[in-house]
Amino acid sequence: MCYLCSVQDDEDEGGAAAGSKPISPLVGEMSRSDRGGYGARQVGRNYSGPFRKTPDRLFGMGLIRLYQLTLSGFIGNSCRHIPTCSEYGYESVARHGLWAGGWMTLFRVARCGPGGTSGLDPVPGELERRYHWWTPWRYFRLGQKAA
């Protein structure tokens, strides 16, 4: 359990603004960039977690990164989801490979249009056993909201 989850209520006396002491004993000793605050250096907007670096994944991620660096600026920031469709595609290809991640990205872009979904739509960490390479239409159901 993290430190924030284990803080007891009896330590707080007088509401949110009453105490000026830091939440963690180490927060006061860290600089703003160590905490990930305003001045923190951001590594990148794309997925930076562990993944197998196979040629198909690197090719797909390279195509998406090429789109981000060239065409994305002309099209504009009009995605209705968080993460954006290109970030979703990058992460889905990195995690699940070019075939599954490509289908997931295609269906995500289709959902982003008029009459589609919006809001938080993260890439699933692991796919269920019913998602096979020979059934790509099932990837369409991944991002749909439960009714």
Image (cartoon, helix red, strand yellow):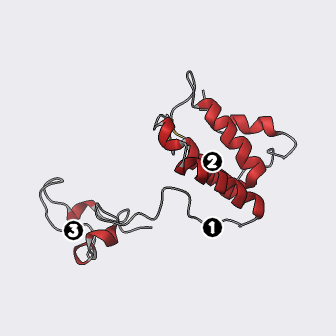
Above or below, 109 relative to 8: above
* Horizontal and vertical percent position of residue 105: 66, 42
Above or below, 53 relative to 104: below
State the SS at label 3.
loop
State the SS at label 1.
loop
Pointer 3 residue: 22
State the SS at label 2.
helix
Q: Residue at x 27, y 69 (%)?
A: 32
Question: Three-letter amino acid code at disc 2?
Answer: Gly
Report the side of 126 relative to 82 (left or right). right
3D distance between C-alphas at marks 2 and 1 = 16 Å
* Marks 2 and 1, the one that precedes in the sequence: 1
Nearer to me, 11 or 121? 121
Pointer 2 residue: 89
Above or below, 112 relative to 114: below
Question: Three-letter amino acid code at disc 3?
Answer: Pro
Q: Residue at x 28, y 71 (%)?
A: 24
3D distance between C-alphas at marks 3 and 2 = 38 Å
* Marks 3 and 2, the one that precedes in the sequence: 3
3D distance between C-alphas at marks 3 and 1 = 33 Å
Q: Residues within 10 Å of mark 3 (few under 14, many from 20)?
A: few
